[in-house]
Amino acid sequence: MRGLIIAIDGPVGSGKSSTARRVAELLGYTYLDSGAMYRAVALKALRQGIPFDAAAQLEALAAETRIDLLAGESGQRVLLDGADVTAEIRTPKVSQFTSKISVQAGLRVHLVAEQRRVGAAGGVVMEGRDIGTAVFPHADLKIFLDASVEVRAQRRLAEHTARGEKITLEQMMGEVHERDARDTDREASPLVRAADAVLVDNTAMDVEETARLVVMLAREKAESRV
Ligand code: DC
């Protein structure tokens, strides 16, 4: 029997990446970070000076861009047209620009097609904003992760501080609010909880607890399919 398709969606700092990666590890599944794909296209657009609202140019850019997500010992590596951009796609500037270009439906078509290609065979944990609603509306298990905005901003702040970037909690809260609003209010595949997604609020849970809860739900799903 094929492995499950597990969709994990949620806002900035809800722990999607770390949870999805750990769930994939525990189940022996493939992990796919869809946000990294949007970030890679955003970085390329920034480098080429393409404005965030140039819909046709962004769509063409997504169509001609090759993005590889490689599982490495020290986490996932992201290759943009063959070059490693793992660190570069995580700066605040790229985060904001990514959220701005992600409203473009034309660009999304190309990335969604690639995500479906990777996940179609099952045995995959995919995380993002629209996995359970648009990419895999028939996913076997859908999780909507959330946490309080303070905790989400603190998690992001810790990531930035660890990389030596100077940013205050107030600035981070502002960024999180801004990105939440843009990701939620856009017309093309907005961040919304699918009706059949399990809501997991992990404000008071760590990654391991969250991942084990998801694994438990996945095992229940797998058993009910037999
Ligand atoms: O998960 P992340 O922070 O790496 O995502 C960066 C941005 O990419 C996010 O603000 C919105 C966009 N995104 C999206 O529109 N759809 C997805 N499935 C994943 C990310």
Image (cartoon, grey):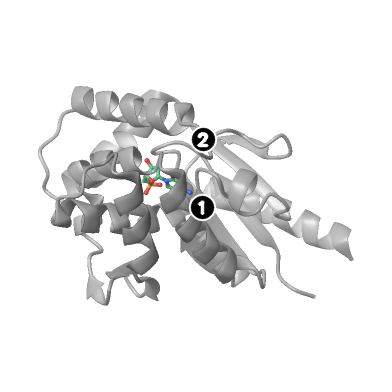
Q: Is residue 165 left or right of residue 98?
A: left
Classify residue 153 as left or right of residue 19. Answer: left
Is 66 displayed left or right of 33 in the figure?
Answer: left
Q: Are marks 1 and 2 in contact (CB under 8 Å)?
A: no
Task: Look at mark 1 in the image and give the residue it sits on.
Answer: 127
Location of residue 74 (image quadrant): bottom left
The kind of residue tagged 1 is Glu
Q: Distance between the residues labelled 1 and 2?
A: 14 Å
> Circle 2 is placed at which residue position?
190
Image coordinates of residue 41 in percent, x first then y, are: 31, 57
Residue at 27 percent of width and 77 percent of height: 82
In the image, 4 versus 209, the foreground residue is 4
Confirm or reject: label 2 Cβ below 8 Å from ligand 1: no
**Tag 1's secondary structure?**
strand
Q: Does the residue labelled 1 lie within 8 Å of ligand 1?
A: yes
Residue 206 is at least partly visible in this image:
yes
Q: Residue 79 placed where, x, y %? A: 29, 71
Name the quadrant containing residue 117: bottom right
Residue 164 point in image, percent of width and height = 11, 48
Q: Which label lies toward us, 1 or 2?
A: 2
Mark 2 Cα shell of 10 Å, populated few (<14), some (14-19), many (≥20): some
Q: Residue at the spot x=67%, y=69% of the render?
A: 122
Q: In front here: 213 or 60?
A: 60
